[in-house]
Image (tube, rainbow, N blue to C red):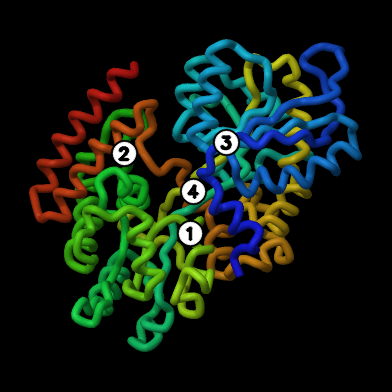
Amino acid sequence: MFTTPHTRRVVAGLAAAGAVVLALTGCAGGSGGDDAPVSEITVVAANSPWVEGVKTLATKYKDETGITVNIEAYGNEQLNDNYKVKLNASSADFDVMAFQVQDVMREFSRNGWLADMTDYVASDAAWNWEDFQPAARDAVQLDGTVYGVPVMTERQIVYYRADLLQAAGMPVPETLDELESAVAALHDPDAGMYGIAMRGSRVPLVTQLSSFLYSYGADFQDADGNASVDTPEAVEAIEFYGDLLSNYGPPGVTNMGWVEASALFAQGKAAFYIDADSQAYTFLDASKSSVVDTVGFAQFPAGPAGSHFYNIVPQTVGINEFSTKKDAAWDFIKWVTNEENTTWLLANETVPGARQSAWADDAAVASFPAGLVDIVRDVADHGVGHDRPRLEQVAAAREIVGGPVITAIEGGDVAEAAASANSQFQDLLDSEK
């Protein structure tokens, strides 16, 4: 099984409101940038499997160092609201802060709320910053400045019905062309089987479009940060995504996010499903899935530019710029993200960390599906550290960028729609300069 019952309960509670404040004991002796001794630090984070694991590790941390770690855990929206209130007031009430990279890092760094951790991560060769997945390291940096250490990762993968492929005598698709052929062959709506299920709703689909863009040699923005959703490669990727859903997807696909699309696959009504690997636990839970014994996991197929899929960081840990205990905060971060503890979290709490060495440990990944482990072990040459446009106004950008895909699903002029979206997207980017 992919997750323990304990972890599934944690995942199910990610969006829970209310703060859970726990006084735990932990870490190595450190200072706040001067010689004053530190007796405690405070960590603020979202409810997550990582936080659950840290609660356990904190006792060991205290035994080693004697420093108390106070953990405040919130639902995601409440967490960000809490940050904005306190950081606007330059609060030093907390030291270590976990955050969602793609949602807030640009805003928080521009406001001067995140400490520069570049020197910290390079300061200890034994801790080994290079052991972290390249895409994950890239994700926590802006203009060469490191703002955090990645503690959880997530990738786009292909879920497929192994029994259907086997019955049809078809191999698991390794290219997008092979994927389309397999989807078409297994599409049988009269029998209640659709070739593929994916997000088709305008905003939710943008993150899943990303890997198609990358594998066609495109991206939301070019190397200079300018809008690039109207390039020939981007238009081809958008058309491919739209055609898959238009020709082989379920009815009403433009109203589907991950909840609706994944439910179809879990009910055995789709041959393929492409989305984040964090959803694997759903399909392996007999109480929620009819495909427990037939689901397979495959790497995102290669397009004209190869297989390139998002490998994002849904949670990273950084340091509050206003903390008076930055060195002690780093001591804790370094300890909890070292190889030993990252491997322990992977093995005992199924926390998908970013260290390559942890995923290489056969014992640590024993509870994960072999197919998924193979994908993560191979991620270094394929992973891209973002799954959406890179700017502060990311919600507005997703609304714009999703438009051409809807046009593709509905059979309209994709090139024209992409050109219009690109102009609007560029205006949004220019507004942040």
In three-dimensional space, the C-alpha distance between marks 1 and 3, rounded to whole angstroms, equals 24 Å
Q: Residues within 10 Å of mark 1 (few under 14, many from 20)?
A: some
Callout 3 amino acid: Gly
Residue under label 2, please give it.
220
Amino acid type of the residue that numbered disc 1 sits on in the rendered structure: Gln
Q: Secondary structure at mark 3?
A: loop
Residue 311: assigned label: 4
Q: As displayed, is residue 320 above or below residue 247?
A: above
Q: Residues within 10 Å of mark 3 (few under 14, many from 20)?
A: few
In 3D space, how far apart are the residues under numbered discs 4 and 1 (Cα atoms)?
14 Å
* First reached walking from the N terminus: tag 4 or tag 1: 1
Determine the CA span between mark 3 and mark 4: 30 Å
Q: Is residue 313 visible?
A: no
Q: Nearer the viewer, mark 3 or mark 4?
A: 3
Quarter placement of the N terminus: bottom right
Between the C-alphas of marks 3 and 2, the distance is 36 Å
x, y percentage for residue 15?
51, 44
Three-letter residue code for mark 2: Phe
Circle 3 is placed at which residue position?
Answer: 18
**N-term-proximal mark, 4 vs 2:** 2
The quarter of the image holding the C terminus is: top left
The answer to whether the residue labelled 3 contacts the one labelled 4, judged by CB atoms less than 8 Å apart, is no
User: In terms of image quadrants, where is residue 388?
Assistant: top left
Query: What kind of element bears circle 4?
Result: strand
Please give the name of the residue rendered at 83% of the width and 35% of the height, measured from the top-left corner. 25
Q: Is residue 77 above or below residue 214?
A: above
